[in-house]
Amino acid sequence: MNRRATTAAIAVSLASALTLTACGGSGGGDVAADKKQTLSVWAMGTEGEKLADVAKVYEKANPNITVKVTPIGWDVAHQKLVAAAAAGRLPDVMQMGGSYMGEFADMGALEPVDTKVFQEKDFFPAGWQQGTVDGDTYGVPWYVDTRVLFYRTDLAKKAGVDKAPATMAELQQAAEKYQAKAGSKWGLSIQPGGLDTVQSFYQFLYSAGGEIVTDGGKVVANSPAAVKALQNYGSYFKKGLSEKSVRPGYDVTKDFNTGAVPMFFGGPWIMGLLDDNYPDLKGKWAVASVPTDKTSASMAGGSALTISADSEHKAAAKEFIRYLTDAKGQSDWFKRTKDLPANLNAWKSGELATDPNMKVWKAQMESAKVSPVQPKWTEITSKIDEAVESVTQGKSSAKEALDKAQGEIESLVK
């Protein structure tokens, strides 16, 4: 599932109902920030929907600026960004996932960040690193993202699980107990295949000490650590603890609510979905760090805000991004979306500073691993998606699948 699979259908329908036009311009003179103008902004998934509300607040305080937000589904975002870049039609401001950054920086499509206005010290290191390519920064961290374990505490008692699984061995033991003693249909929901399966696999890969490509550009997709991680991942499907076939748009929270799925790895926005859609579940679930294998490590995801190199509204775009990424703007955005603030100053007060659940997220984010910057990272991870699916469907061993991926990825690395 992509990171907003639960809202992807909404975002895609919204995107298709809009004409995706931008005011890319010729790269000529920049319009002053205080002049009357329209900023075009593309944002993905839930962010695309929520950002329109924030834009209205911004417009009231800045009547000279009209902010036109176009929501785009994550499943079509990469394709639309590539097409717009090729046509010189990128919007002024665009949300960009870390996996895209190297590709678009390599194209020369992005304006470098003004590091006098936006300073590295104010953000999670992993967030800042995702916007940096070959020493130059092209994206201001908007929110950070990682994965932790969601689990049903009430069903844990029935299953005889008295604490959150602390190790990968305990995770599988808990999955077996939930299924055998608590009536759960499955033990753990992890993605069996399809687009971005790698995001589900990262927790196993990184915790085993594996990687796909090192920071230095060495492909290590079939390392012993990676093979061990995929063997562990595949064992859930072999033992019937995880579902082999998940339909597109699958919403794990529905099965979490019924108890059919008692555990899954999820992002921070899931908390809001559970609170909003299943209030009766309150007090019956909790979050915990990714269980330890060699270590406890999760993926570092999230998005940055970037400015098109061709934009004629760079000054106004910079002011809008500053509004969204300072401590006040980040706290407001967290209340609206449950996205984890990238700005460290936002964590110093309110719920972010006092909620025990938020301390789990913050600790996991501090150890989260950033993917290396590679122009073809989307294509590289698709090879891992295929390898994982081959194993979960029983078509090949972990070693065979990753040996194949290794060969394919070597030709894609910069």
Image (cartoon, grey):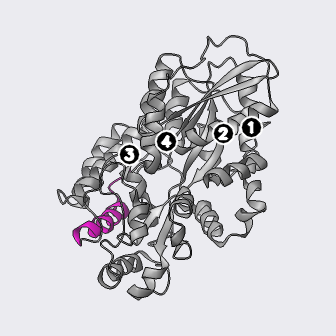
Q: Is residue 208 visible?
A: no
Q: Is residue 263 above or below residue 73?
A: below
Left or right: residue 42 compared with residue 63: left
Determine the CA span between mark 2 and mark 1: 7 Å
Residue topped by disc 4: 99
Residue topped by disc 2: 53
The dot on residue 57 is 1
**Amino acid carrying mark 2 in the image:** Asp
- Number of numbered labels in the structure image: 4
Marks 3,1: beta carbons within 8 A: no
Q: Say which label, 2 or 4, has the lower sequence index.
A: 2
Q: Is residue 6 above or below residue 282?
A: above
Residue ID at (37%, 69%): 261
Give whichever of 343, 406 is nearer the camera.
343
Q: Is residue 361 visible?
A: yes
**Helix or strand or loop: what does disc 1 sit on?**
helix
Give whichever of 105, 170 is nearer the camera.
170
Q: Is residue 137 above or below residue 180?
A: above
Circle 2: is it few (<14), some (14-19), or many (20+) Cα within 10 Å?
few
Give whichever of 301, 37 is nearer the camera.
37
Circle 4: is it few (<14), some (14-19), or many (20+) Cα within 10 Å?
many
Determine the CA span between mark 3 and mark 2: 33 Å
Residue ID at (45%, 26%): 82
User: What is the x, y in percent for residue 292?
Assistant: 47, 73
Q: Say which label, 3 or 4, has the lower sequence index.
A: 4
Determine the CA span between mark 3 and mark 1: 38 Å
Q: Which residues are the magenta region?
A: 220-239
Residue topped by disc 3: 381
User: What is the x, y in percent for residue 202?
Assistant: 43, 58
